[in-house]
Image (spheres, coloured by chain):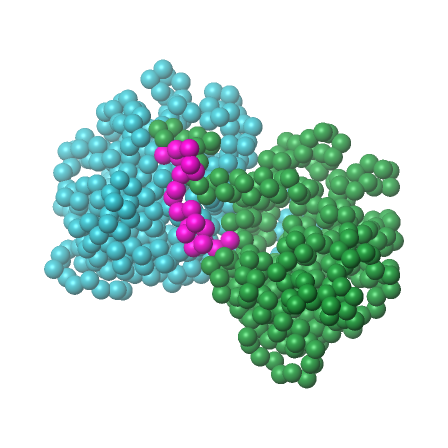
Chain colours: A green, B cyan
Amino acid sequence: MWAPEAELTVVPIGDFTTEAGATIPDAFIAYQRWGTGDEIVLVEHALTGDSNVADWWGEALGPGKALDPERYTVVCTNVIGGCKGSVGPASPAPDASPYGSRFPAISIRDQVHAEKQFLDALGVDKVHAIIGGSMGGARTLEWCLLYPEFLDAACVIAVSARASAWQIGIQSAQISAIERDPAWHGGDYYTTGQSPKQGLAAARRIAHLTYRGELEVDERFGTSAQPGENPLGAYRSSDQRFAVDSYLDHQGDKLVQRFDAGSYVTLTDSLNRHDVGRGRGGLNKALASIAVPTMIVGVDTDILYPYHQQEHLSRNVGNLLGIAKITSPCGHDAFLTETRQMDRIIRSFLAMAASPGGAEYSI
Amino acid sequence: MWAPEAELTVVPIGDFTTEAGATIPDAFIAYQRWGTGDEIVLVEHALTGDSNVADWWGEALGPGKALDPERYTVVCTNVIGGCKGSVGPASPAPDASPYGSRFPAISIRDQVHAEKQFLDALGVDKVHAIIGGSMGGARTLEWCLLYPEFLDAACVIAVSARASAWQIGIQSAQISAIERDPAWHGGDYYTTGQSPKQGLAAARRIAHLTYRGELEVDERFGTSAQPGENPLGAYRSSDQRFAVDSYLDHQGDKLVQRFDAGSYVTLTDSLNRHDVGRGRGGLNKALASIAVPTMIVGVDTDILYPYHQQEHLSRNVGNLLGIAKITSPCGHDAFLTETRQMDRIIRSFLAMAASPGGAEYSI
């Protein structure tokens, strides 16, 4: 049933209907799989991540590592609405032309339902654990609410129970930066020969500042000029930059090379829609109903998902395995960069998940 | 010598040469003045503020208030590069056409030098105290270093010793939002019949999120929809908004009505250039050399100028009067919104400034 080891493989999941009532006919989900262990661990990627866990969490995946393919079957799908093999705005619609603006809005719940249809298509009826950070953490949380019988344990990293107004504000600013790019064409740029590169790069520059720690960025760049440029000249010029601006430009350019603006808008909108309380009697009632043993992880310097949001989760989830705090100057991205701490946390989580009688504790 | 009470008045200050070596011929500074007290208190406005202290700090200015016009002569200038009466990018150059891109870059030190030329033009040779927050705090700090003999005491609010890399990054994102507006025309839009309203509004939306507290914004708006709009529809649409997005749009629209995009870019660039250490042997050496009795004020929830930056200032300024922390959910803007706390802080500062032998203490 499984695709070849580590090989990106696309699985048709049939028609898919969103939470808000739109239908994507003949939807498909791309995924990768490592190992053949008895227990399945489903890993959930973040906004601009993809199914290639070996790429973005390589320190966690491999023989002898926390996600050991000799012990587990590690599975990661590309999220619906993404651009790395799953159906998204750049995919052809039934009329063979790219969806563009015709691609429906996708909620975090839709992302989970699509992943469930994917697992159904493969004949998987149970996974041992689901682990995810940021948007992947939001999916993990929704898994606990939508399909609690389907998993033994969940590890929810660097996310909140719902989007905060501040997050919505800064995320909408990114969407708006893309929409204001004349090459966006209302989302229907795929056949124009243009793409909203400047808008996407601008969005990423803003986003990146929310992903990193203020002190870490300052320690690296301070007020230094980019070598060969003079940001203190007699006339301001956007090609005479501080080092931090060059760094952010580079982050923007890198994303433009590897990511589709339409997917970026769709998935950023998904984050705006994140709210486990919707239709469930409110946030804390929803969290209290979670019976899946759940581990909560946060980062002390995260400004996008501040640690008090993970404290809120840990106070309210119905079945708390434990809470762990990553200590790092790196902010939100620490769940990707602090590999030693994440290793210890994932191992502890999987150990706790394996002994369901274990008492809850903090790492 | 003074202009009529509270009346916006423009004072020619002669040719002005910037730190980076450009010259603005026949420069001029607009100001307002309240009261006729023996001692002059110079108030310094923030980025999009202006000389009208009664407008943005009305709770602090007036008979019986902290800045009592019966006791003090309260003076506030519009910063050079601004758009409320002082020479700026929208002003006519010697050829009678607006400066636009020909307006030179302005550093915080330039802002202070221009203000000093203004006071020289009026024949003022001493002020009792200088008080300012945010960009006004940066000016106040530079006053202590550039003209220490000119003032008895300084109150520096919600600012840092230099721009941090994070601040530069988020500020440059705002400049870039304006530059990417096709109506910007490289800064020379004044004669085109257009103005980069969308870019300026986008910049303000980003900025506003750095001015407010994350918890306060969330308490006000959470994930609520703007009444009459549905941000959870089957297809994303930028006119179907969350309440916080409508609020930020409103903040952007308000600024567009009252502020010039060219001035916004010039003054945001000034903030990027803020660094009291430049040419003075570094940050802490510069701060240690400050002999002016200086009070430092910060806000506990400020994400733009985090409180550790004011702690840094207070540890290093050569002559510390005291440090005060404003406790507020409102973030950076608390120095404008927490009027009761600011009242107490300004009164304490002026009391300490009046008795130079007073020991330093924290409020």
Which residue is at the far left? B357
**Could you tell whether A234 is left or right of B357 in the image?**
right
Q: Indicate the quadrant where residue B281 lies.
A: top left
User: Is residue A215 located in the magenta-colored stretch of the structure?
Assistant: yes
Q: Which residue lies at the image location 82% right of the left edge and 51% below the top edge?
A: A10
How many discs mark residues in the rendered view?
A: 0
Task: Tell me which secondary structure the magenta stretch mostly adopts.
Answer: loop
Q: What stretch is highlighted in magenta?
A: A212-232
Give how far across and how far down residue B217 sits, in percent.
Answer: 52, 56
Q: Which residue lies at the image location 37% right of the left edge and 21% below the top edge?
A: B92
Give how far across and how far down residue A198 sits, in percent.
Answer: 59, 35
Q: Which residue lies at the image location 49% right of the left edge and 26% below the top edge?
A: B186
Is A272 rendered above or below residue A340?
above
In the depicted view, which residue is nearer to us: B218 or B159?
B159
In the depicted view, which residue is nearer to us: B104 or A20?
B104
Residue A260 appears in the picture as rendered: yes
In the depicted view, which residue is nearer to us: B5 or A192?
A192
**Could you tell whether A340 is left or right of B288 in the image?**
right
Give the position of the N terminus of chain A as an image quadrant.
bottom right
Is A135 rendered above or below residue B18?
below
User: Is residue B166 located in the magenta-colored stretch of the structure?
Assistant: no
**Could you tell whether A41 is left or right of A159 in the image?**
right
Give how far across and how far down residue A236 sits, in percent.
Answer: 41, 31
Residue B263 appears in the picture as rendered: no
Give how far across and how far down residue B74 sits, in percent.
Answer: 23, 44
Q: Which residue lies at the image location 15% right of the left edge and 37% below the top edge?
A: B124
Is B103 rendered above or below residue B69?
above
Give the position of the C terminus of chain A as an image quadrant.
bottom right
Which residue is at the far top? B95
